[in-house]
Image: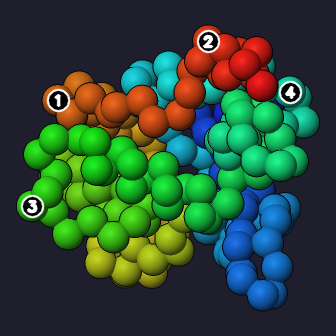
Amino acid sequence: MPPHRVRPADGLIEVVEVRYDSGKFGRGYKDRPKSPASIRQVPLAKQAADAVVEALVGCPADGRIFAGPGGNRHALRGERTALTVGNYRRVYKRVVDKAAGLAHLDLRGPHDLRHTYATWLADAGILSRVIDELMGHSGGAREGSPMGRTYRHTTPEMLARVVAALEERLAGALPVPQVCPNKAQTEEANRKE
């Protein structure tokens, strides 16, 4: 995600460009998601906005906020590199393995986070149409007629309830162990090389 698409001061992330990894068919970034419904603004909880602000430190204007850790033959450890599906899965697995209290869950990969997001919002009483909109689904068929979906809109008050629900759940969530080096660790490792 490029830095200009993230607005932590406004509590928003704009989803426009997407990363894809299609195996032998290629990988990279596309300027548009699969469907128009996937182009959206997603509200950020304060905890997420704070994490994004931290990730922006040292991020060049043409860089990516969520990037790979480097540390390969093409980049020094800690240098921002393309985030591959493999890197994403490895980091997810490290966090899950280090976090206490998750052994009873059937965790399969980073896509689980979408399930958690939707479940938390549904549990907080957020309308399924709003959840669908935030997740980039064109659906919403569970809530009324096609005409009703045309005339109902997400209000700022609805988004405020989404943010409040996420902040409440994140405040009670397990602390996430650090699995990527922080800036001081990266500088130390680069000095040793």
Quarter of the picture containing the C terminus is top right
Q: Helix, strand or loop at disc 2?
A: helix
Q: Helix, strand or loop at disc 3?
A: loop
Disc 1 marks a residue whose amino acid type is Gly
Residue at horizontal 72 percent and vertical 19 percent from the top: 192
Image height of 101 relative to 50, above or below? below
Image height of 154 relative to 136, above or below? above
Viewer-nearest of discs 1 and 4: 4
Q: Which mark is residue 184?
A: 2
Disc 4 marks a residue whose amino acid type is Pro
Disc nearer the start of the sequence (1/3): 3
Q: Position of residue 137 (x, y in %)?
A: 50, 71
Disc nearer the start of the sequence (4/2): 4
Cα gap from disc 1 to disc 2, whole angstroms? 29 Å
From the image, tell me which residue sits under label 4: 60
Viewer-nearest of discs 4 and 2: 2
- Using a 10 Å C-alpha cutoff, classify the residue at mark 2 as few (fewer than 14 neighbours), some (14 to 19) or many (20 or more): few
- Position of 10 with respect to 121 (left or right) is right
Is residue 1 visible in the rendered image? The answer is no
Q: Which mark is residue 172?
A: 1
Q: What coloring was used for the rendering?
A: rainbow
Disc nearer the start of the sequence (3/2): 3
Viewer-nearest of discs 3 and 2: 2
Q: Are marks 1 and 2 in contact (CB under 8 Å)?
A: no
Residue at horizontal 53 percent and vertical 44 percent from the top: 42
